[in-house]
Image (tube, helix red, strand yellow):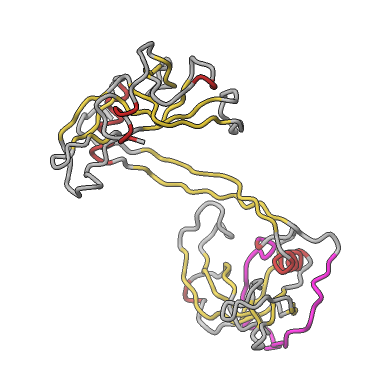
């Protein structure tokens, strides 16, 4: 990244555990997978939905009539996945398939193990391959496999009370997004300036508002921005909140203050942490200055600058 004109790029990963509780229908469905019992739910019109839902998508009526369906089914449509990604059901190329299990009227999305796309077709018969270890999740279905050679033994759905020992009542799903972030021309210049401990925005040629961080265009006027303007380094606290919950992997003791700070010369406020003052003494209008950590690429926090508080009229338009 030595070329000053080169646009920055960086690999980023957003990852967090998503925890949710289950109602009676989803609880029964996932517990059934653990016990190798695929379940659906019957609507008032007699249709069997797999995966089951708690409310009829057509009438919004509450649904509780659980039924057991078959572990074999028919592929209704498919798409070949030549390059499986991290966290997908199979490590080798496979087909994404919608499978209507025997006894169901809707299709379930999962993976089909096949030697190649030529071995997959709409209408082919398939069977669930159960995972060796099951815990009450959709991954209890390891994948589908071909059942073309087996006798066609379609089955009718059978009533099921949904009762299992030790039912699954909640799940934790690991959400993860891997991507390459390219900030573009405007924010590349902004980030390079921060590395020099300067804050630079861009001025709209129409309304003259200075945007920090710059966006490459004025969101109000809709025109491109290119005039670079250095702002700050001092600024004014416009609004703030007191944080009382400690974030994971963030080595900051609570309570602390996170604020909107209007840097001198900027047309809108940016976010920053306030330190160097008791949290209950932070106030609107407080004048602050940045504090940089050793080797930091952006201010670690802002502290009082020692100046008199700004008059409300000077920042009210930036709230």
State the image quarter where residue 40 is shown. bottom right
Task: Give above or below for 318 relative to 134.
Answer: above
Left or right: residue 141 versus residue 195 is right
296 lies left or right of 148? left
Left or right of residue 312, residue 243 in this image? right
Q: Is residue 292 above or below residue 129?
A: above
In the foreground, 59 or 9: 59
Residue 48 lies in quadrant: bottom right
Residue at the image point whose x is 47% and y is 69% from the top: 80
Was residue 158 drawn as part of the magenta stretch in this picture?
Answer: yes
Q: How many marks?
A: 0
Residue 128, position as x, y percentages in the image: 67, 72
Highlighted range, magenta:
139-164
What residue appears at the point 47 percent right and 42 percent down from the top-left corner? Answer: 13
Rendered-image quadrant of the C terminus:
top left
- Image quadrant occupied by the N terminus: top left
């Amino acid at each position: 990244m030595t070329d000053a004109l080169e646009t920055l790029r960086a690999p980023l990963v957003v990852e967090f555990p998503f925890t949710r509780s289950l109602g009676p229908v989803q609880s029964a469905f996932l517990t059934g997978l653990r016990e190798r019992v695929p379940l659906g739910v019957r609507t008032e019109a007699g249709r069997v939905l797999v995966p089951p839902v708690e409310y009829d998508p057509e009438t919004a009526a509450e649904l509780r009539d659980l039924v057991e369906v078959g572990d074999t089914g028919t592929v209704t449509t498919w798409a070949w996945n030549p390059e499986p990604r991290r966290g997908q059901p199979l490590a080798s190329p496979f087909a994404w398939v919608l499978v209507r299990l025997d006894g169901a009227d809707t299709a379930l999305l999962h993976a089909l193990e096949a030697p190649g796309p030529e071995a997959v077709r709409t209408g082919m018969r398939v069977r669930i391959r159960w995972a060796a270890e099951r815990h009450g999740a959709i991954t209890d279905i390891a994948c589908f496999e071909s059942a073309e050679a087996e006798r066609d033994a379609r089955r009718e759905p059978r009533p099921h009370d949904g009762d299992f020992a030790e039912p699954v009542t909640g799940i934790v799903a690991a959400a993860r997004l891997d991507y390459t972030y390219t900030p573009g021309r405007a924010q590349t210049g902004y980030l390079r300036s921060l590395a020099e401990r300067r804050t630079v925005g861009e001025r709209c040629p129409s309304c003259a508002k200075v945007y920090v961080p710059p966006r490459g265009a004025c969101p109000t006027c809709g025109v491109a921005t290119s005039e670079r303007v250095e702002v700050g380094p001092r600024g004014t606290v416009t609004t703030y909140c007191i944080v009382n919950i400690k974030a994971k992997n963030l080595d900051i003791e609570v309570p602390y203050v996170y604020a909107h700070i209007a840097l001198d010369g900027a047309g809108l406020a940016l976010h920053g942490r306030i330190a160097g003052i008791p949290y209950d003494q932070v106030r609107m209008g407080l004048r602050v200055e940045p504090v940089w950590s050793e080797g930091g690429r952006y201010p670690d926090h802002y502290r009082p600058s020692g100046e008199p508080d700004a008059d409300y009229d000077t920042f009210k338009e930036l709230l």
